[in-house]
Amino acid sequence: MTMIFGVPLAVFMGQLLLGLINGAFYALLSLGLAVIFGLLKIVNFAHGAMYMLGAFATLLGMRYLGINYWAALLLAPLFVGLLGMLIERVLLRRIGHLDHLYGLLLTFGLALIFEGTLVNFFGVSGARYPTPEALQGGYQTGFMFLPKYRAWVLLAALVVCFATWYIIERTRLGAYLRAGTENPALMQAFGVNVPLLVTLTYGFGVALAAFAGVLAAPLYPVSPTMGSNLLIVVFAVVVIGGMGSILGAIVTGLAMGLIEGLTKVYYPEAANTVIFLVMILVLLLRPAGLFGKEA
Amino acid sequence: MATTQTMTPSMKRERRANLRRTAFYLGLIAIGLVAPFFAYPVFLMKVLCFALFACAFNLLLGYAGLLSFGHAAFLATGGYVTGYLLASYPALTPELGILIGTVAALVLGAAFGALSIRRQGIYFAMVTLALAQLMFFFYIQAPFTGGEDGLHGVPRGHLFGVISLRSNLAMYYFVFAIFLFGFALIQRAVHSPFGQVLKAIRENEPRAVSLGYNVDAYKLVAFILSAGLAGLAGSTKTVVFQLASLTDAHWHMSGEVILMTLLGGVGTLFGPVVGAGLVVSLQHLLAQSPLGNWVGPILGVIFVICVLSFRSGIVGEALKMYRKNFK
């Protein structure tokens, strides 16, 4: 059997794939954080809760409404996105003129509310969501077994990431968004409805998180705390990459997932912490972040 | 010397204000001294430990304008180090155990502070949160913390090797003395030239830099002081409750201390004390009521309300009212 530094190739590739999938989730979440941060200048602490709500909407939609996976892929982000727009309209807008730390605190409070409420109804152990039939089984490639669902998650996440990049960097709406990030007051003076743009942006950002949640539902146990633990890692990813660049967020997310996967192969004890250690290294060597400009 | 004859009205006013302040502090200390005869001492000790924790956090947020989302790491470090030492070396007296725990938190604070002040604003908050999570994973895996179970049966021992702390009353006065020490230290720091520079940094960092202050050094010292006092609170708490657990290291704890400070009043000396008292009381009451499972969401709602419409906190609002009506 082929070995890579004393590890069988199949195991090595398997962990790498797992890492890449984790990385795809980091990328989707940090992308949403970056989009929201760009226009609203707040760090959305409720992002993990939105990811969790996406997974729960998928689970409960199937259980009580008979909504299948493919419909949930569209409906769950829509539902969470609308919820996000409501939150922006009713709550975040009121503190828009204040220090941006208040936005962090407010969304932290929201995260506590969502998470705590669901813990009371569903406990913390988590429920299983079945893999959709069309994606069961896998491919036997020459060197490893590739489960269909994992391949799909990777593909879907990458497509959504790059579609987001395309919308923001190459379309008119994206141009508005980028201009709003630079100078919202001037945009408003030019007759662009900036408050609406802000609402849509927040809704879109959290919808991305919810989409990640739907993808995650068949992979990980669906539990109310699934989001918060992930979010702290994503924060570290964001510190590493900086929130200035869309492509930067995607690349950093994927790279951190790979590093985590590699660590799991060679030094499993540090797999939980390696991203934080990379963050420390980046802070020492390049404090502004890999793709960041110092604000 | 007949100084009174040369006193101007403003000097007189200042002297009266000083007298009032002294009387106010003495009154509060008197209340603290008799409190254990009216309320359950263990509850009061819990309030005092969290009050010290919140005051330490407030030193950073309220006076230097730095929002740390990772203060649980220092609370837990103090608690674990003190708990492990006292449980493993019976000859060690509690005050030495607490001292070493505090120094450990201080050292960790120096490392984390040096790293996190390299970024500003919300990045600072995210860095501290991530570093604290690193410590959380470390404490789950480290051999001396008891992992998920935590450390139990930490002996209270004899203070200075003489006074037994087994009685809750003796323990209370020891905790009260520690709290007073911590509070006085913060009070001194805030009103010193050092504290004035911190406030200047909070208000306008580039201006403080251009005035020639070494802003990073000031921030770092504030961070270390805050981390050390948070560690002192954690160490003391471990001796009181005779246990150290992962709860103290969890990011929920970092959130709770923010809530205490925000609710009581950011940037006021007594705000964190009031906030800690309220949050601990609330948790205590809810735990006994049918709403016991709803502590998290209820704290979340209070958080949202505080941010939306009560940003000065209880003490902050009270001070505003006092200034409006009596000055």
Image (tube, grey):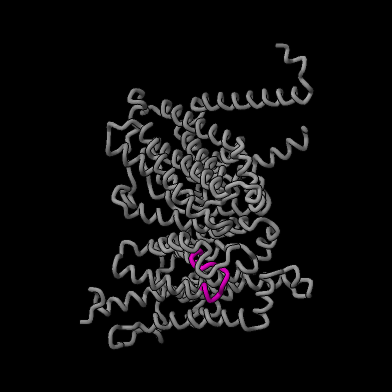
- Identify which residue is drawn at 64% across, 83% down: A171
- Which quarter of the rendered picture does the N terminus of chain A lie within? bottom left
Q: Is residue A5 visible?
A: yes
Vertical order, B68 against B93 (above or below): below
Q: Would you say residue A243 sits in the magenta stretch?
A: yes
- Identify which residue is drawn at 63% across, 40% down: B196
Q: Would you say residue B172 sits in the magenta stretch?
A: no
Write down the quadrant of residue B120 in the picture.
bottom right
- Which quarter of the rendered picture does the C terminus of chain A lie within? bottom right
Q: Nearer the viewer, residue B312 or A219?
A: B312
Q: Where residue B138 appears, x then y in whole percent?
A: 36, 54
| Residue A288 appears left or right of A220 | right
Q: Where residue B255 appears, x then y in whole percent?
A: 52, 51
Q: Where residue B216 appears, x then y in whole percent?
A: 55, 50
- Identify which residue is drawn at 67% across, 25% down: B18
Write down the quadrant of residue A219 in the picture.
bottom left
Vertical order, B127 against B176 (above or below): below
Q: Is residue B202 visible?
A: no
Q: Where residue A16 appears, x then y in whole percent?
A: 35, 76
Q: Residue furthest front?
A: B212
Stretch of the chain drawn in magenta: A238-249
Vertical order, A2 against B243 (above or below): below
